Image (cartoon, helix red, strand yellow):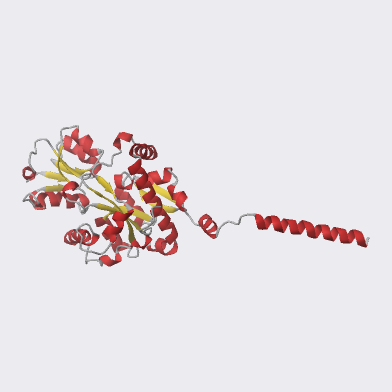
């Protein structure tokens, strides 16, 4: 009896030891994996604008996953609705132009710009009816533009360079998506828009008379995140940025495949996808523009011009400190190409 008990005890110990050994040999999930499982997706706004399209590539090609972050792109067909999503707390990250960034920061002072996406270099266009032969012909006419936003700034630049002022025209607050039909029925005589609405307007005889190609650097896109996200999930933000640059490089190397991915993801014709008139920045270009210097392509002079516009327009009561707008610490190291 005693011998049987001893044998049972030895057998039980052997089984226990083998179980412990097997458990020890199993790969334990890394701390990063466990924390990723516990975290919700990083929610980022997305919309119909060429400067945001690499996000579709990053999602479809799995670049965000490869970099270690779960990203949920919240598509909004209304670009201006993306701003409301951010201020309402529905998303963590918002891509937009500088005048919106400055306005949002007035309500979300802890948010920061962490990425310079690219700039329009002809993609923003003022289209005019065929009888408008010169910009000076617009005096006394109706021009469509989103007031208090990029459209009004572009129209203002166009008029100023041709001896006119905003008061010399009637500015009509019209969405860029409605410019083509409004030109066709002569509700307006000119208007700010972009593709595919430029092509739509051209079908009724309208033609481009001014574009952002003539204002290099003034109209650029940035990515901003909430202060709480930057503080609590810095590695996720860094991973998002790495995935972004991976997508940008892929699109530049494989433009046709990139166009097809974007068209499928956004359910739009592939013919509507074009990088013409837009410059997507590489990591090196972003780092250069974030650097504090007097280079005309750096951010400070461009941001100040947007602030001047918003102050004069009455949208800002005081000038913000631009040193508190940008945070380049989330960019990959200069030597990294990931």
Horizontal and vertical percent position of residue 171 = 14, 48
Horizontal and vertical percent position of residue 141 = 9, 44
* Residue 49 visible in the picture: no
Q: In the picture, residue 86 is in which quadrant?
A: bottom left
At 18% from the left and 47% from the top, the residue drawn is 213
> In what quadrant of the picture does the N terminus appear?
bottom right
Q: In the picture, residue 269 is in which quadrant?
A: top left
At 9% from the left and 51% from the top, the residue drawn is 161
- Furthest-front residue in this view: 335
- Asked if 310 appears above or below 163 in the picture, the reply is below
Horizontal and vertical percent position of residue 214 = 16, 48
In the rendered structure, the answer to whether residue 23 lies left or right of residue 110 reads right
* Residue 118 visible in the picture: yes
Q: In the picture, residue 286 is in which quadrant?
A: bottom left
- Asked if 275 appears above or below 35 in the picture, the reply is above
At 25% from the left and 56% from the top, the residue drawn is 98
Q: Nearer the viewer, residue 80 or 336?
A: 336
């Amino acid at each position: 009896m005693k011998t049987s008990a001893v044998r049972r005890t030895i057998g039980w110990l052997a089984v226990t030891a083998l179980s412990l050994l097997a458990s020890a040999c199993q790969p334990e999930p890394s701390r990063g994996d466990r924390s990723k499982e516990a975290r919700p997706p990083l929610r980022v706004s997305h919309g119909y604008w060429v400067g945001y399209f690499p996000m579709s590539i990053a999602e479809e090609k799995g670049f965000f996953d490869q970099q270690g972050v779960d990203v949920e792109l919240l598509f909004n067909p209304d670009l201006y609705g993306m701003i409301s999503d951010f201020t309402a707390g529905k998303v963590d990250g918002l891509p937009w132009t500088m005048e919106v960034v400055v306005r949002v920061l007035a309500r979300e002072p802890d948010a920061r710009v962490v990425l310079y996406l690219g700039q329009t270099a002809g993609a923003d266009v003022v289209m005019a009816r065929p009888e408008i032969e010169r910009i000076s012909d617009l005096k006394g006419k109706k021009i469509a533009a989103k007031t208090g936003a990029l459209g009004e700034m572009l129209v203002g630049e166009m008029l100023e360079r041709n001896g006119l002022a905003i008061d010399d025209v009637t500015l009509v607050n019209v969405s860029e998506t409605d410019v083509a039909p409004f030109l066709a029925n002569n509700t307006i005589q000119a208007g700010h828009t972009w593709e595919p609405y430029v092509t739509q307007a051209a079908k009724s005889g309208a033609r481009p008379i001014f574009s952002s190609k003539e204002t290099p650097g003034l109209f650029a896109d940035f990515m901003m995140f909430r202060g709480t996200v930057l503080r609590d999930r810095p590695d996720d933000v860094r991973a998002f940025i790495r995935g972004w640059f991976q997508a940008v490089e892929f699109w530049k190397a494989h433009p046709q495949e990139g166009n097809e991915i974007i068209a499928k993801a956004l359910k739009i014709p592939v013919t509507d996808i074009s990088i013409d008139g837009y410059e997507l920045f590489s990591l090196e270009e972003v780092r250069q523009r974030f650097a504090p210097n007097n280079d005309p392509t750096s951010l400070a002079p461009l941001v100040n011009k947007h602030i001047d516009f918003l102050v004069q327009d009455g949208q800002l009561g005081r000038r913000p400190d631009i040193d508190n707008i940008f945070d380049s610490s989330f960019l990959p190291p200069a030597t990294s190409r990931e």
